[in-house]
Image (cartoon, helix red, strand yellow):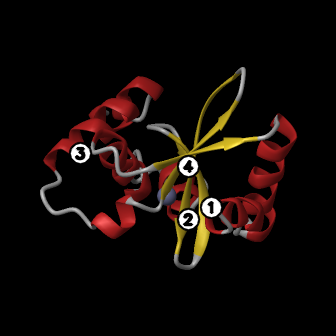
Amino acid sequence: MAEDNKCTVQGSLKSVIEEAEKLEQYDEQALRRFIRLQVQNVDLDTWVYLGPSGDYVLVPGLFCSCNDFTIRVVGKREKCYCKHLVEQAVSERKKLYKTVNLESFEEYVKILNEIFTQNLTSTLRRKLYSR
Ligand SMILES: [Zn+2]
């Protein structure tokens, strides 16, 4: 029963943060893969993890588009979060992420679309690496 209660919206965010505080060994390279998306005048809390084998969309403490989240968190309810949600909390706290300011809301939607349909956002990668 306690297990069920933990996976409420607030419970999940709290346990992600608790888990992040317990982590003593960080994969700093992984923490630097997080990108916070911003669009001027739009209130967003959307992050992207640029992974070695694919990109994920994250909403801190709530959602990640990886398979582990879909199968074990949403599907089987084995746990409340995936490792990316914990790493995102650590990355945010340690300020190891990058912020990318997007030109428009359309560009934001395009990036999310690329990740959901192709597992990889060439638009965001281009913005980051072509400077
Ligand atoms: Zn994940």
Pair 3/4: label in front: 3
Residue type of the residue flagged with mark 1: Leu
Vertical placement of residue 71 versus 3, above or below: below
Are the two marked residues, 3 and 2, in contact with CB atoms closer than 8 angstroms? no
**Going 48% across and 51% down the picture, which residue do you hit?**
73
| Residue situated furthest front in the rendering | 131
Q: What residue is shown with label 3?
A: 19
**SS class, disc 1:** helix
**Mark-to-mark CA distance, 1 and 4:** 31 Å
On whether ligand 1 comes within 8 Å of the CB at mark 3, the answer is no
**SS class, disc 3:** helix
Q: Quadrant of residue 66?
A: bottom right
Vertical placement of residue 44 versus 128, above or below: above
Q: Judge by depth and name the residue closer to the eye, 128 or 93.
A: 128
Task: Tell me residue 105's x, y (percent).
Answer: 82, 35
Vertical placement of residue 63 versus 28, above or below: above
Q: Between disc 2 and disc 4, whose residue precedes?
A: 2
**Mark-to-mark CA distance, 3 and 1:** 30 Å
Horizontal side of residue 36 vs 118, given as left or right = left
Horizontal side of residue 14 vs 105, given as left or right = left
| Residue situated furthest bottom in the rendering | 53
Q: What residue is shown with label 1?
A: 128
**Mark-to-mark CA distance, 3 and 2:** 22 Å
Vertical placement of residue 74 versus 120, above or below: above
Q: Between disc 2 and disc 1, whose residue precedes?
A: 2
Q: Between disc 3 and disc 2, whose residue precedes?
A: 3
Residue type of the residue flagged with mark 4: Val
